[in-house]
Amino acid sequence: MDALYAREEFRIGVQAFNRFNFNEAILLFENALRYRPGEALILEWLGRAYYRSGFEEAAIAIWQASAAAYGYSSRMGMLLSSKIETLRIRRSLLPVADDAVRYVESGRFVGRSGDLVLYRQPSAVLPREDGTTWVVAYGSNELLRIDVNGIIRDRKRGPLYGFDRPYDLARGPDGKLFLSEFRGGRVSVLSAEGDWQYYIGSKGIGPGQFMGPQNLAVDDEGYLYVVDFGNRRVSKFDPSGTFIASFGKNSANAEVLKFPTGIAVADGIVYVADKYSRSIHTFDRNGAYLGVFISEGLVGPESLRLLSDGRLLVTDTNRFLLVDPDTAIVRELGVIGNISAVRVTGSDIDRNGSILAADFKNGEVSILTRIEDKAAGLFVKIDRIVADEFPLVKAEILVQDRLRRPVVGLDQRNFLLTEYGSPVGGLNFLGASNLSTLSDAAIFIERSAESAARRDDLAAAVRDIGASGMRLVSLVSAGERPTKENLAASGGVSPARALEEAARGSASAYSPRWRFDLGLRLAATDLLAGEKSGPWFLSEPGSTPQTPRAGLGRWLLKTTASLSLPPTLRITESCFTPFLSAAKLLPNWPTFARKPAARLCSFTVTKELPVSWQAMFPCRPVIIILVSLLRFLRITAGPTFPSKPKSTSWKDPAATKQATLPRWNNLAYEEPGLFRATRLWWRRVWLNGLVRQLKLSNTLLYHGNQLSDNPCDF
């Protein structure tokens, strides 16, 4: 009887776990253990529930007990030991230094398949957010979009007469693409999807004309810089395509550029590579010559790419170099082939962290991967199972590398689900979350005594948030006892008015003992099953939450968030700076979200911020939006799923599945449970174990136990 009771408690616990009811799951698994003490499978699921609830130490201890019950030398014991080791690596609060990272060749997008020519002479690559990559094919006069599996998804050949030897591709702040045409002596302006719109410039030697335009760069204000190879100069155009100026000479009016190739713009400085002098020169945005940036160590620089961290990726014949603009330190990332057999004319780093290199000489795109990723492999986790419509079963699958960086661009061809060693039929790929335009949000409002005077401003801010197009699932008042406000409109009150009144809150809701930790946890609860979601935190400058030491210390000492959805937060000189990048995700997002806001410890803010928001921005961050980086793939399987268990063994669970990736073939182990898959898991952000439910990936948050006397000093 004990076995039957334990099985029933375990079954209900797994269902609660997949409904995100982790507290309920913990109780059910512990009840199951009362009937079957020390059962390895129950212990493992109990560890999962504790981990997802934010209790990492407890989860690790339970998993260690489970590994011991399985046997450390068994397959499941080794799996759990590996999981514990990886979790400890991922728990670091500091970004992992990449100074020692090395890239090795791991694959290629071939330009020929037997006698079939797919494309010729690739000269440049430009990754996209969805994991695909634009490849400029110089030899076949086209622009191709290739996915992570090397499948050509789209071809663009330009207007009626086509492209004329396209060479490089650059993206503007608004998503527009600029394509240089070497023989055509012009630059084509394309839509974000590669559709031709109009030309910039023409062939010639006059102002705004080109003789062999090659590499391109666009600065953060949308100005276009074109390397005019034949005229040995750089031409600058405004965002509308109007010619502004050309430069390439020093103060003595002597030509500096002999064989200009790559170009990049960072922090107002224009970097131009010269293949003849084997150096990189610098100019200001007006074309004034600043001097030689790098004069030694280069063999034949071909292209420059500005990376997201502000460093430069330099393509040097067959080498890939990482250059720090602040220190001019050059570090070699990797090499492909030998210098006589390879000529790489352009490279970039894609969304999955791999270097894509256009090998002009061999007519293919090489892929270089971090050596540790190639050794450690990828981690696949079934994050959630939805069996409400059984026998139709839905699974949310997360794919990451060992440092919890999500892998994007995958599709159904990358997954093989098996049960008892046999493939599962009836699979249907429903899509990837990073391509979804749906977003859910919970608004979290500080109800401190200082915030009481800002009730009207809070209402105005919430009104702006409500107009952004996101679905608001809840509004939490973080007072002494955080509560969820009623957002339902009644008595003839409009929904917008009801939202404003909820944002103002009652006078009794404000307290000097407001609780940040409990409020944030409450705000996260409604977001568990949502789309790209996160809490919005509205705060009053200078207020201090009453937060227990076991939660957030006495306040967030430092916070670093590395998110790609609206908006992102980073530490800048000990103060928060929001980098608002929501425009690409939500077309209706407020216009102020299209540019970075000013430092929050400054009294100046960007003009785009509404007046009602400016009043609340003097020192502390008023709004913190923690938005999900959930990178899961939804896959469903039809009636081929068994309706009854084929086994009642605790160590051989009933319904098991295995997911593998054909291209990344290093996924070789399994997890037990309702839905078996190669693992590992998904690191979720917690404020010292409070809000793992937020579904935040690649986010690091710091907490401290002391407050600085300076309210702006985090």
Image (cartoon, rainbow, N blue to C red):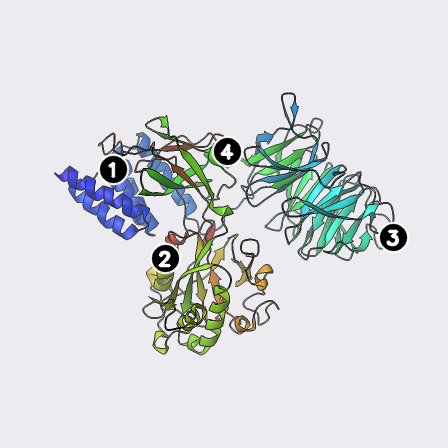
User: Which corner quadrant of the image does residue 138 belong to?
Assistant: top right
The x, y position of residue 313, in whole percent, is: 64, 43
Q: Tag 1's secondary structure?
A: helix
Question: In this figure, which residue is indicated by the disc labeled 1?
Answer: 40
Q: How many residues crowd around disc 2 within 10 Å: few (fewer than 14), some, or many (20 or more)? A: many
Residue underneath mark 2: 526
In three-dimensional space, the C-alpha distance between marks 4 and 3, rounded to whole angstroms, equals 50 Å
First to last magenta residue range: 680-686
Relative to 93, is 622 above or below?
Answer: below
User: Earlier along the polypeptide chain: callout 2 or callout 3?
Assistant: 3
Q: CA distance from mark 3 to mark 1?
A: 78 Å
Between disc 3 and disc 1, the foreground one is 1
Residue 13 coordinates in the image, percent (x, y)? 25, 45
What amino acid does circle 1 point to?
Ala
Majority secondary structure in the magenta region = loop
Residue tagged 3: 253
Which numbered disc, 2 or 1, marks the residue closer to the eye?
Answer: 2
Marks 4 and 1, the one that precedes in the sequence:
1
Name the residue type under label 2: Asp
Q: Is residue 481 left or right of residue 341?
A: left
* Residue type at tag 3: Asn
Residue 549 appears in view: yes
Residue 209: image location, x then y, percent: 83, 48
Q: Residue furthest left?
A: 1
